[in-house]
Image (cartoon, grey):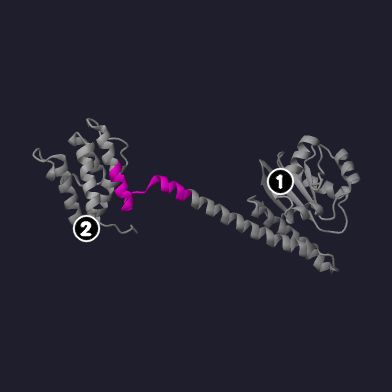
């Protein structure tokens, strides 16, 4: 629904007429502006006689538009807006300086009447609104990360747990990872099972898809378990990589053996429970953590990179 408008004030109307007198030389230029502002051509032509000067034509048009009510008032506002968009007087005007001054006076009264927007102030307001929105997003993200940290600490607290509780903790880890990635604006697909395999999650980061294996058990993964995950990764497109998350950490000897015995490319990055504690604790952001591990793997061949180092 259109916002309500009012007819032009005397002050704005007078400045419009001053612009018509000072910033227009050819009648056709005035007519083109009026018609472009939705003044009905029949209405304009009614006053555009050879006996009427440009200012008299404009005054008569504005007066008839005022008498038309809301529809006419909106056209009045369009005329003002069109005039305010002129950066210089129209062709043929001899006193350009006077024409520019008339346009500037009209812009000032039009801004004061809220007919047009002060572009400088609008830019300031827009920047302020963007910054406020950015700060709001930061606060919301901090709140989410704070909640995730509390939940991770609760799950990590040392205490006796039943078999069912231990299994539930593994599922909770998968959920925490999904929410952690989403809080960092990284698209993350949750765990799912196909006819042939279980995938704990997947995400897309810096041009590569990653499969996720998330384990929260007492023992470190064996070479056989690492091989099983690598087969999942290698079964996808060549660009696919893997992120293996083990809360119990990793045996460096097993990782070295696995890397030396793995056929083809080594495309798995490893994240331990200690790494996750640093991320959930706010010591390092998730994006920086991933980049550190990926850079170490790509540049140095270090697929097991300790974030605390």
Where is residue 86 shown, x and y percent of the image? 30, 38
Between 54 and 188, the residue placed more toward the observer is: 54
The residue positioned 69% from the left and 44% from the top of the image is 209
Q: Which SS type dominates the magenta stretch?
A: helix
Q: Does the stretch in magenta take in 95?
A: no
Q: What secondary structure is marked by label 1?
A: helix
Residue 85 picture location, percent across and down: 32, 41
Report the residue marked by disc 2.
69
Q: Which residues are magenta?
A: 104-126
| Residue lying furthest left | 51
Q: Nearer the viewer, residue 250 or 62?
A: 62
Instruction: Please report whichever mark, 1 or 2, sits nearer to the chain's N-terminal start.
Output: 2
The CA distance from mark 1 to mark 2 is 61 Å
Bin the neighbour count of mark 2 within 10 Å (Cα to Cα): few under 14, some 14-19, many 20 and up: few
Residue 105 placement (x, y as % from top left): 28, 44
Read off the residue under disc 1.
288
Cβ atoms under marks 1 and 2 closer than 8 Å: no
Mark 1 crowd level (few <14, some 14–19, many ≥20, 10 Å Cα) = few
Q: In this image, 117 relative to 152: left or right? A: left
Residue 2 occupies which quadrant of the picture? Answer: bottom left
């Amino acid at each position: 629904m259109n916002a309500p408008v009012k007819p032009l004030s005397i002050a704005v109307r007078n400045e419009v007429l001053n612009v018509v007198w000072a910033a227009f030389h050819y009648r056709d230029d005035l007519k083109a502006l009026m018609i472009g502002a939705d003044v009905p051509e029949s209405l304009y032509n009614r006053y555009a006689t050879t006996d009427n000067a440009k200012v008299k034509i404009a005054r008569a048009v504005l007066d008839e538009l005022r008498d038309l009510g809301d529809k006419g008032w909106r056209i009045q506002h369009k005329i003002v807006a069109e005039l305010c968009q002129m950066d210089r007087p129209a062709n043929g005007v001899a006193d350009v300086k006077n024409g520019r001054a008339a346009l500037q006076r009209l812009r000032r009264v039009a801004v004061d009447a809220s007919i047009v927007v002060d572009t400088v102030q609008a830019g300031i307001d827009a920047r302020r609104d963007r910054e406020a929105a950015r700060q709001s997003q930061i606060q919301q993200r901090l709140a989410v990360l704070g909640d995730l940290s509390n939940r991770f600490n609760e799950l990590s607290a040392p205490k006796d747990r039943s078999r069912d509780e231990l299994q539930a903790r593994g599922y909770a880890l998968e959920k925490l990872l999904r929410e952690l990635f989403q809080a960092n604006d990284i698209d993350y697909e949750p765990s799912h099972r196909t006819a042939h395999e279980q995938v704990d999650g997947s995400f897309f980061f810096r041009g590569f898809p990653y499969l996720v294996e998330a384990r929260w058990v007492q023992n470190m993964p064996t070479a056989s378990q690492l091989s099983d995950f690598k087969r999942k990764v290698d079964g996808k497109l060549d660009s696919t990589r893997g992120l293996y998350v083990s809360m119990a950490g990793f045996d460096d000897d097993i990782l070295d053996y696995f890397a030396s015995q793995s056929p083809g490319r080594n495309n798995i990055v490893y994240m331990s429970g200690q790494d996750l504690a640093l991320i959930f604790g706010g010591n390092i952001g998730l994006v920086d953590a991933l980049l550190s591990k990926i850079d170490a793997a790509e540049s140095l061949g270090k697929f097991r990179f300790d974030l605390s180092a």
